[in-house]
Image (cartoon, rainbow, N blue to C red):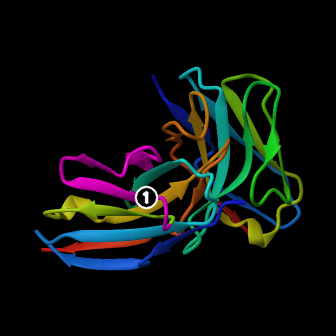
Amino acid sequence: NAGVTQTPKFRVLKTGQSMTLLCAQDMNHEYMYWYRQDPGMGLRLIHYSVGEGTTAKGEVPDGYNVSRLKKQNFLLGLESAAPSQTSVYFCASSYSGARETQYFGPGTRLLVL
Amino acid sequence: GENVEQHPSTLSVQEGDSAVIKCTYSDSASNYFPWYKQELGKRPQLIIDIRSNVGEKKDQRIAVTLNKTAKHFSLHITETQPEDSAVYFCAATSDYKLSFGAGTTVTVRA
């Protein structure tokens, strides 16, 4: 099992450009999450999904959109990147909710110039 | 929503000594409290968790305690080793999503 994988590992964008981050899991997990990690601020939830076809806003959703068309994939989109979105993005999944172990992907480092 | 505060933000300990990290939470309905460890450049990984129906849980050199009345929980690492150097995050939840503390950077001095 590959677990949770993320694509790409690193990306540089110019302000105003768009991009999509892909998260994939092969553990048949229902729940998937997107976090951003900034120095001194821990992990902040952007959006999450409780199952295929569902999405919900987290703590810091502005400027991001998500889609969960397939159970194994969770996509995070930035329509018009801003320097404030420079961060490390982690995807995670869990079998049946937040009260179970969350398995994290390796992260995507995004730099917006 | 849930608010989790974590202290200290940095902690330096001599190898072999103990380390203690403390977290407080705001939502009395929270009932699950995991701790994640993140080594430099790596992904966070669960190291131990506790549910609200127990007060303490141990796993070898690590232990977690929970005080529901005071709404705080703590991570204890005994006999620290160099491989314990990492960032540790506490978290709490009562529903579909975890709220994380800001993290504690632990450095174990040889």
Q: Is residue A75 left or right of residue A79?
A: left
> In the rendered image, which quarter contains the C terminus of chain B?
bottom left
> In the rendered image, which quarter contains the N terminus of chain B?
bottom right
Q: Is residue B31 above or below residue B26?
A: above
Residue A68, horizontal then vertical, whole percent: 78, 30
Q: Secondary structure at mark 1?
A: loop
Query: How many numbered marks appear?
Result: 1
Foreground of the two, A7 or A2: A2
Foreground of the two, A49 or A98: A98
Magenta run includes residue B57 = yes
Foreground of the two, A51 or B41: A51
Chain to which mark 1 belongs = B
Residue B39, horizontal then vertical, whole percent: 37, 58
Magenta run includes residue A43 = no
Res A113 visible: no
| Circle 1: residue type | Gly
Bounds of the magenta span? B44-70
Residue B5, horizontal then vertical, whole percent: 54, 71
Res A30 visible: yes
Q: Magenta: predominant secondary structure element? A: strand
Q: Tell me which residue sits at (81%, 43%) in the image.
A: A56
Q: Look at mark 1 in the image and give the residue it sits on.
A: B41
Q: Is residue B77 above or below residue A75?
A: below
